[in-house]
Image: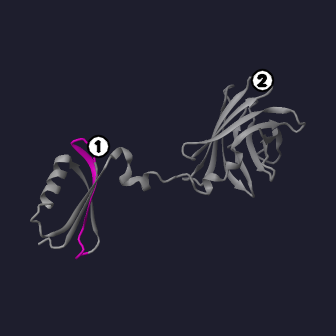
Amino acid sequence: MFTETEYFVKCADRMHETSRSLLLVRLPRHGGFFVQRAIISKTFLNLITGALLPSDMKFARYVTVFCVLVGSTACFSQQQNACACCTKKNKEFNFWVGEWKVYNKDGKLAGENHIVVIQDSCVIQENWTSANAPFRGTSYNFYNTQTGRWQQLWVDNQGTNLQLEGGLIEGEMVLSTKEWVNKKGQKQIDRIKWTPFNDGSVRQLWESSIDGGNNWTVVFDGMYRSK
C-alpha cells in the first residue's frame, strides 16, 4: 500500500530524549510534500529507521535520515542567518561610520568620534569625545522599519539627551527633534544635518529654532576627517 513511496526524515537532535524537528514526507504518486513540525525522540527515530529498513522491505524505495545537531542550526540556517538589516535603507547612514577627527569652522580640533556598526548592521553607534573638556556622548542610530524613518537617541555625560528622527534628503541625512521646552522656558526644535563629500569627509551641522522653524541658530558646525 506504500509502493514506491519515498520517506525523508530531516531531524535536529541535540542528543537529548526529545528535540524539535522537521519531518518531511514525499509521496511521488501524489506529488508535493507534507510538512509537519514534530517532537521526535531518539527512540522514535530508531523506531522509524528500524521499521522502514528491514531487508525484506519491498514497499519503499529508500529511506534517508539526516540528523544534524541543533546547535549548528543547519536545518534552518538560511532563514536564521539572513541579515535583516542589510537593506539599502539600513545602509543610508553608513557614510558616517569611521574613525574621525572633527574640526570647527576655524580649523581647530573639536573632538574625536568613533562610529561603528553594531547589532548585525541594525544599529550605528556614535562615541564622541570632546577635545576641550571632559565631555563625552553616545548616540544610537537606526532605520525604523515600522515608521520608515531614521531615529537617533543621544545621551551624554552631562545628562543631556536628544531624540531625533528623519531621513535621507537629497544625499543628506536630516534628523530633527519634536518641539520641546528648554531651560529658558522656550519651545525649541533641534535639527542636525550630515552631508557627505566626495573626498570622504562629512559635515555635521546642528541648528536650533525657537520660533517653530522659521529661523535657525547654529549650535555646532563640524567637519569630519578620517584619522
Determine the residue located farthest toward the right in the rendered image.
Answer: 106
Residue 72, placed above or below residue 154: below
Could you tell me the amino acid type at mark 2?
Ala
Residue 193, percent from left and from top: 76, 47
On whether residue 31 falls in the magenta region, the answer is no
In the image, which disc is placed on residue 14?
Answer: 1
Residue receiving disc 2? 133
| Residue 110 coordinates in the image, percent (x, y) | 81, 32
Mark closer to the chain start, 1 or 2: 1
Say whether residue 209 is visible: no
Q: Farthest top residue?
A: 134
Residue 221 placement: quadrant:
top right
Q: For residue 129, which quarter of the picture?
A: top right
SS of the residue under disc 2: loop
Kindly report the distance in space between the C-alpha atoms of the residues bearing marks 1 and 2.
55 Å
Residue 157 versus residue 189 in the image, above or below: above
Which quarter of the rendering shows the C terminus?
A: top right
Q: Secondary structure at mark 1?
A: loop
User: Magenta stretch?
Assistant: 13-30
- Is residue 223 among what the camera can see? yes
Kindly check if marks 1 and 2 are in contact, taking CB atoms under 8 A apart as contact: no
Q: Who is closer to the viewer here, 104 or 198? A: 198
Residue 109 position in % (x across, y down): 83, 32
- Callout 1, which amino acid? Arg
> Which one is in front, 84 or 63?
63
- The residue at the far front in this view is 55
User: Could you tell me which quadrant the N terminus lies in?
Assistant: bottom left
| Residue 99 numbered mark, or none | none
Q: Residue at x 79, y 46 (%)?
A: 201
The residue at the point 67 percent across, 26 percent down is: 157
